[in-house]
Amino acid sequence: MRVLVVEDARALAAVLAEGLRDQGLAVDVAYDGLEAAAKLSLNPYDVVVLDRDLPGIHGDALCQMITDRDDRAMVLMLTAAGSPGDRVSGLTLGADDYLAKPFHFPELVLRVRSLARRRPAARARTLRAAGLELDPLRRTVTRDGRPLDLSVKEFALLEALLRASPAFLSAESLLEQVWDEHADPFTNTVAVTIGRLRRKLGDPPVVTTSPGVGYRIAGPPDRGAPPG
């Protein structure tokens, strides 16, 4: 899952980005509306955590720009203005959720994950394929009923592969989805993390590689019933 944090208070932006990355999310940061608009034109995001009172382009205008896109990100408006009237006006602009400052960080994480699941292109919550079952909300993964202990990046990598299954994902695509804009495109980080993941998943191998194409989960996907 890739998130854009748009917050002009740099200290708060750093805290948000670090906390979300600790949860296994790929996070980019913009400090004003103009920088955010540029990043939104270049990168696909699942969720935008958007401060309302921004320099450059105001958060209200940026929210409308996001919601006018065909393949748009979900918007969590984050602002010090927390009265009922402020919340109504924010949601009227097209924001999908609204959280007033100060906030409880675990609640922010839950809301971001909930918005990602509600995104029109999102899949069912529990992902299944080749004997694997992964629940992004509970942060659990099993193979043939056996719990697996994965690192944050291993879990995020497996989630991306399961969402794409049975299609291949290139190393570049995995860098975009699991790391962030600062990842070195020439790094071998993806291959190294794939190697660790394969060892933890055990035999028979379920992550296959096609040189020049990428990686995929072998076996038909079974994502279960859609969420109600």
Image (spheres, grey):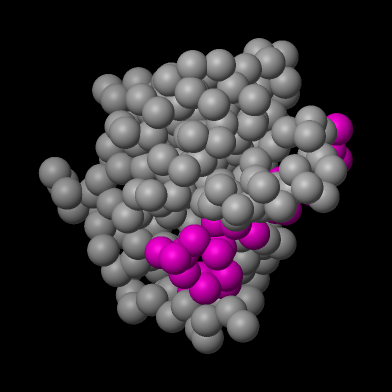
95 or 192, which lies in front? 95
Above or below residue 227? Residue 70 is above
Farthest residue, direction top: 10
Outermost residue, left side? 212
Give the side of residue 169 with respect to residue 29, left or right. Answer: left
In the rendered image, which quarter contains the C terminus?
A: bottom right
Q: Residue at x 78, y 34 (%)?
A: 81
Q: Nearer the viewer, residue 194 or 27?
A: 27
Q: Quadrant of residue 130?
A: bottom left
User: Is residue 106 in view from this perspective?
Assistant: no
Which is nearer the eye, 10 or 211? Answer: 10
Q: Residue at x 54, y 52 (%)?
A: 94
Residue at 43% from the left image edge and 20% from the top image edge: 34
Quarter holding residue 141: bottom right
Q: Position of residue 39 (x, y in %)?
A: 38, 28
> Magenta stretch containing residue 25, yes or no?
no
Q: Is residue 122 magenta?
A: yes
Q: Which residues are magenta?
A: 102-128
User: Residue 44: x percent and y percent?
Assistant: 37, 42
Q: Is residue 222 above or below residue 192?
A: below
Compared to 189, does 84 lie above or below? Answer: below
Q: Is residue 166 visible?
A: yes
For residue 36, above or below residue 220: above
- All told, the count of numbered labels is 0
Q: Residue at x 58, y 79 (%)?
A: 227
Residue 22 drawn at (x, y percent):
67, 35
Name the residue furthest bottom: 225
